[in-house]
Image (cartoon, rainbow, N blue to C red):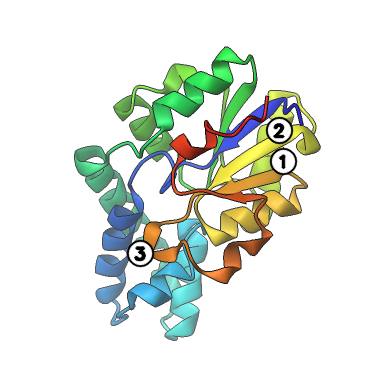
Amino acid sequence: MQYKAAIFDMDGLLIDSEPLWQEAGIETLSGFGISLTLEQYHTSTGLRTEEWVAHWFRQYQVSPAHAPEAVQVIIRKAIEKIAANGIALPGVTEILGFFNKQNIRTGLATSSPMSLVDVVVDKLHIRDQFQVFTSAEYLPYGKPHPMVFLECAKSLDVLPEDCIVFEDSFNGMIAAKAAKMKCVVVPAPEQADLPKWGAADMKLLSLNEFLTYNYF
């Protein structure tokens, strides 16, 4: 199939930021008496911070009045940690270069705020590799709703069915499939063998692995 656009998630796919989000989230929730296991944390990756906090506050019966404060603390901590310690994941430069050489439009669609997008794309020196940046920050719905992917496709001026999405989270995969886009997942190594990735069109160990397939 000849795709017209490639859409990329950001955290955990382009940059090794999920452990840093995890630190920021778990540190912040501990201040509200919530202690998450890693297994619990992984069930909620891919959500917007507001929805992530609301989910765990409901689970542990913490007053939602504290949610705005928690959200702001998590985002601040995450941005600081990622700016200081985030590193590119394997294959980022290569796969973006590949699609650009093919004249296939590229977009970034993330649940993270645009303030973090700016930090990441400048840190990795990939700003000029994308035509569109889309955040679910101010959309009515975040992943696993498909809205952020649909908005990205609209901004790229392509139909959803002409897009291929690269994701690392389960919620992101569900969002991509709900948008009627093809989805390639690159899960964290400790999650890679779980059956939940069965809905993806392809599962890879790294972005570099995609370049070994003849899709174009």
Mark 2 residue element = helix
Seen at 62% across and 16% down, the residue is: 102
Quadrant position of the C terminus in the picture? top right
Amino acid on which disc 1 is placed: Leu
Amino acid on which disc 2 is placed: Ala
Amino acid on which disc 3 is placed: Ala
Seen at 66% across and 58% down, the residue is: 174
User: Can you tell which of label 1 and label 3 is closer to the viewer?
Assistant: 1
Q: Residue furthest bottom?
A: 61
Label number found at residue 110: none
In the image, residue 58 sits, relative to residue 41, either above or below, namely below
Q: CA distance from mark 1 to mark 3?
A: 29 Å
Whether pointer 2 and pointer 3 mark residues with C-beta atoms closer than 8 Å, the reply is no
Whether pointer 1 and pointer 2 mark residues with C-beta atoms closer than 8 Å, the reply is yes
Q: CA distance from mark 1 to mark 2?
A: 5 Å
Q: Nearer the viewer, residue 81 or 158?
A: 158
The residue carrying mark 2 is 153
Q: Quadrant of residue 159?
A: top right
Mark 1 residue element = helix
Local packing at callout 1 (Cα closer than 10 Å; few below 14, some 14-19, many 20+) is many
Label number found at residue 150: 1
Q: Nearer the viewer, residue 71 or 193?
A: 193
